[in-house]
Amino acid sequence: MRTVLFSTVAATLLVTAPAAAQVQPQYSAAQPQPAATQASVINLDNRIVALERQIADLLRAEEENGRRISQLESTLQQEREASAQRISTLESRLAAGTPAPTVTASEPASEKPKPAVAGKSSTPKPVAAVASTDTDPAEEAYDAGYQLWKAGKYDEAIGALRAFSSAYPNHRRTSWANNLAGRAMLDKGEARAAAEVLLANYRGNPKGERAADSLFYLGQSLMKLDQPSQACKAYGELEAVYGSNMRADLQKMLPTAKTQAKCKS
């Protein structure tokens, strides 16, 4: 029995000896990897430099936007003051009984005076000896904005027209002024701002004298924004609400506008 037991223990020791030899503690320290560490540091530095550049660009853009906003606010304030001064001057003339220059406010080129009919005398008719001093300061204030728009001074025109709408919110020309302000923005290249102003003019006073025009030029603004399907909706609204009651100019321009937008009907 002892011989068998010894043989068994010896066999066990022989079998487990290699395994025990393999489980020797490792005393050697891990060797550093200078190349990998250096690459990681360089990569981290590059990322930090890129982040610093992005932050610098953002700060520079914010400063530029701040300057632009400040300039726009200054320009708008000057326009408001100039408009207020013109209105004050007109009111002072009216109060003093001084006749102001008579001007005819108009908007589209199509509303220019019609030429004389052939066969009729173009000699002006005699006028009353005493000129009327019944001038409307609101009409002249609107015309001031119109003349600025006509001269291509869109920023000044927008300021004057907005000042008019603020001073005379219930005047019949308010519909004209809001519409022309939207057109000035569109002419200036600010299609999104123009769309907002024109839509507000239509929704705020759909019975206004230039509400239909605002719908048409809303469609034009949407075309500038690459939204032909929305432009078609504006043109469809124009036809549905105003139909044959819209001005002849709009009736003439509408088919071409719908074709450009590829409207289905």
Image (cartoon, rainbow, N blue to C red):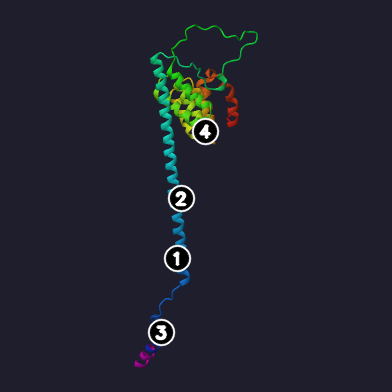
User: Which mark is on residue 57?
Assistant: 2
- Amino acid of disc 1: Val
Which callout, 1 or 3, points to the residue nearer the camera? 1
Residue 158 shows up from this direction: yes
Task: Assess disc 1: are there few (<14), some (14-19) or many (≥20) residues with their C-alpha within 10 Å of its C-alpha.
Answer: few
What is the CA distance from the residue labelled 1 to the residue labelled 3?
41 Å
In this view of the protein, which residue sits in the foreground, 14 or 113? 113
**Residue occupied by mark 3:** 21
**At which x and y percent is residue 47?**
46, 59
- In contact (CB < 8 Å): disc 3 and disc 2: no
Q: Amino acid at mark 2?
A: Asp
Q: Tag 4's secondary structure?
A: helix
First in residue order: circle 1 vs circle 3 = 3
In the image, 97 versus 220, the foreground residue is 97
Q: Nearer the viewer, residue 213 or 149?
A: 149
> Magenta span covers which residues?
1-8
Foreground disc of the pair 1, 2? 2
Q: Main secondary structure of the magenta part?
A: helix
Q: Please state which of residues 143 and 256 is positioned toward the viewer in this rendering.
A: 143
Q: Nearer the viewer, mark 3 or mark 2?
A: 2
Can you tell which mark lies on residue 188? 4
Q: Earlier in the sequence, mark 4 or mark 2?
A: 2
Distance between mark 4 and mark 2 Cα atoms: 28 Å
Quick check: 129 above or below 143? Answer: above
Residue 9 is drawn in which quadrant? bottom left
| Horizontal side of residue 154 vs 118, given as left or right | left
Helix, strand or loop at label 3? It is helix
Disc 1 target residue:
41
Q: Residue at x 47, y 29 (%)?
A: 158
Badge 2: residue crowd in 10 Å (few <14, some 14–19, many ≥20): few
Q: Is residue 102 left or right of residue 118?
A: left
